[in-house]
């Protein structure tokens, strides 16, 4: 029964790679911020900078604070002292995306007693770069936490389920607190399942789960033992006309980023997914 497996296992290793463009194009990505064409220039009308000096179109500029006032000043043609135009740098870095992405998954079903089935699951994912000066692309990253249901996005992200926490809550964030995606994650799950009915018109089963996992911005931050843990119960209903529907109640035993105590309970609704 594909809706309620009682035995068997699945092990998979997958890789997604692009050509290593940076090995052939001759661009020194680590030095872009020092090159003339990637420096900030003034594009407005002629005016005065925060220092009271003329600020003309085409001048190289930098941001500074004078007498408590922060603003732009001209450095004329001295591009070495101008600010880096990060937008231009990023546009050059990601003009051709390059990365390699490796994933491992082990999924095992074991009949415990009668109709009671144990599902054990292990997942690992890693996103890497060929050229470290270019860095890991901001696309194709992992977003951990919540119901695992993928929302529409254009950055190729993968949403990883970890119940008991809010969606994407266990994902690295930037200085503004916005999720930026992880380059490495691991997850462990154990789920006890018991069928209520397995009729062709409707299959229903109850479950109880234990989960743990974490995600990290870089490989050097990786710690496989620093995990966010959760437990809970749920129900799944499969009807041919609607597919798989479900609800889970989960309790997060660890704090989410920005919290100081156990996160507590979360309710997740599942539509069209098989866990």
Image: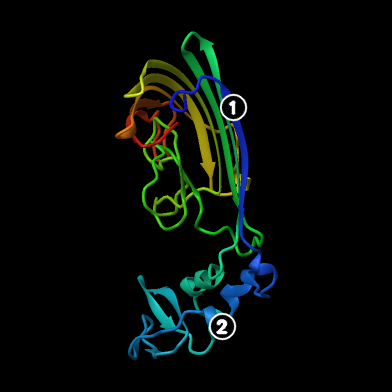
Mark 1 lies on residue = 9
Which of the 4 image quadrants contains residue 243?
top left
Q: Which element type, helix, strand or loop, lies under badge 2?
A: helix
Q: Whole-percent x and y of residue 8?
A: 58, 24
Please report whichever mark, 2 or 1, sits nearer to the chain's N-terminal start. 1
Q: Whole-percent x and y of residue 14?
A: 61, 45
Mark 2 lies on residue = 36
Disc 1 crowd rating (10 Å Cα; few below 14, some 14-19, many 20+) is: some
Disc 2 crowd rating (10 Å Cα; few below 14, some 14-19, many 20+) is: some
Question: In terms of depth relative to the viewer, which is nearer, 72 or 157?
Answer: 157
| Residue at the image point whose x is 59% and y is 74% from the top | 32
| Residue at the image point whose x is 59% and y is 60% from the top | 135
Q: Which element type, helix, strand or loop, lies under badge 1?
A: strand
Which residue ends up furthest to the front in the rendered image? 200
| Residue at the image point whose x is 38% and y is 82% from the top | 51
Question: In terms of depth relative to the viewer, which is nearer, 81 or 227?
Answer: 227
Q: Is there CB contact under 8 Å for labels 2 and 1?
A: no
Which of the 4 image quadrants contains residue 267?
top left
Q: Whole-percent x and y of residue 225?
A: 59, 31
């Amino acid at each position: 029964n594909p809706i309620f497996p009682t035995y068997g296992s699945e092990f998979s290793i997958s890789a997604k790679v692009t050509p290593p463009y940076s090995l052939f194009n001759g661009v020194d990505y680590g030095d872009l911020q020092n090159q003339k064409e990637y420096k900030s220039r003034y594009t407005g009308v002629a005016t005065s900078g925060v220092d009271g000096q003329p600020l003309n179109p085409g001048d190289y500029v930098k941001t500074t604070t004078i007498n408590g006032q922060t603003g732009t000043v001209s450095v004329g043609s001295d591009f070495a002292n101008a600010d880096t135009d990060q937008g231009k740098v990023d546009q050059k870095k990601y003009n051709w995306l390059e990365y390699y992405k490796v994933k491992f998954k082990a999924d095992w079903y074991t009949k415990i007693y009668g109709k009671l089935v144990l599902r054990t699951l292990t997942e690992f994912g890693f996103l890497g770069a060929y050229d470290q000066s270019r860095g890991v692309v901001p696309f194709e990253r992992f977003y951990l936490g919540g119901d695992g249901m993928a929302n529409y996005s254009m950055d190729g992200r993968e949403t990883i389920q970890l119940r008991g926490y809010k969606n994407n809550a266990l994902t690295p964030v930037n200085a503004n607190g916005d999720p930026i995606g992880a380059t490495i994650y691991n997850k462990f799950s154990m789920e006890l399942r018991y069928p209520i009915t397995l009729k062709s018109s409707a299959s229903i089963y109850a479950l109880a789960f234990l989960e743990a996992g974490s995600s990290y911005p870089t490989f050097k931050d990786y710690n496989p033992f620093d995990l966010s843990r959760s437990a809970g119960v749920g129900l799944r209903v499969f009807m041919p006309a609607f597919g798989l529907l479900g609800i889970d109640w989960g309790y997060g035993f660890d704090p989410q980023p920005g919290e100081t105590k156990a996160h507590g309970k979360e309710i997740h609704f599942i539509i069209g997914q098989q866990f």
